Amino acid sequence: SLDLKNTPPTVMQEMETPTICALNGGAAGYGMDTALGCDIRIRGKSAKLAAAFCKRGLVPESGGTWYLPRLIGWSKAAELIFTGRTLNADESVAWGLASEVVADEELMPRARAVATEIAGNAPLAVRAAKRMMRMGLNEPFPEHVHHVYLQLLPLMQTEDLKEGMMAFMEKRQPDFKGR
């Protein structure tokens, strides 16, 4: 039996920490699938994104057939996979495969700025939000809402919630500890 539970795409899918792809250069095939596995994708203007699998006699083996229909819908996913097209920067954003496009020299500073913004939030809440978003991809809405409420219960007992509320009331930035 083929055990793929420790492959990079599977490990990334199960990570509770947010992942940011700073896409520069070319990402075709496995590189594209790896980028799709990230929560946030920021790409440099000159970066290339291509699902070149069918052009090589393969299928997207590292998550592309799972991610693409969920990210951009069936028709666009089929078009991208079946044609193996390379998407330019504007198409990547228009299709929902990148959050934004920045000048190449601004790519890493922008990715770090987004990471810093995320890191300023309550880490337990960020991880829970990511977990709930992933669960929501595979469950009916009523079941999902139930799971979200179950997740709220332990979060409401955290020091971070108290800190977040106090910081809001005191009009200051919170100092979250992950507890």
Image: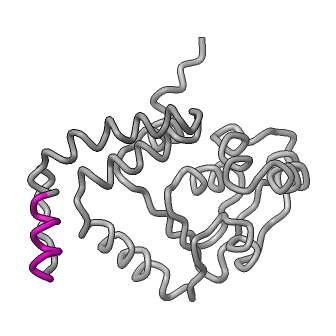
Q: Is residue 95 magenta?
A: no
Task: Please tell me which residue is depicted at 86% across the width and 52% down the height of the picture.
Answer: 75
Query: Viewed as shown, does residue 113 lie left or right of 75?
Result: left
Q: Which residue is drawn at 87% across and 40% down?
A: 57
Q: At which x and y percent is residue 161?
A: 16, 57
Query: Residue furthest toward the top?
Result: 1
Asked which colour scheme the image uses, the reply is one colour
Relative to 108, 53 lies left or right? right
- Residue name at image x 57 percent, y 88 percent: 103
Quarter-of-image position of residue 65: top right
The boundaries of the magenta stretch are 162-171
Q: Main secondary structure of the magenta part?
A: helix
Query: Where does residue 155 sit, x and y in percent of width and height?
Result: 22, 46
User: How many callouts does the rendering have?
Assistant: 0
- Residue in the image at 59% along x and 17% along y: 2
Quadrant of res 111: bottom left
Q: Nearer the viewer, residue 49 or 160?
A: 160
Image quarter hosting the N terminus: top right
Rendered image quadrant of residue 118: bottom left
Residue 149 in the image: state x and y as whole percent.
Answer: 35, 40
> In the image, 32: left or right of 176?
right
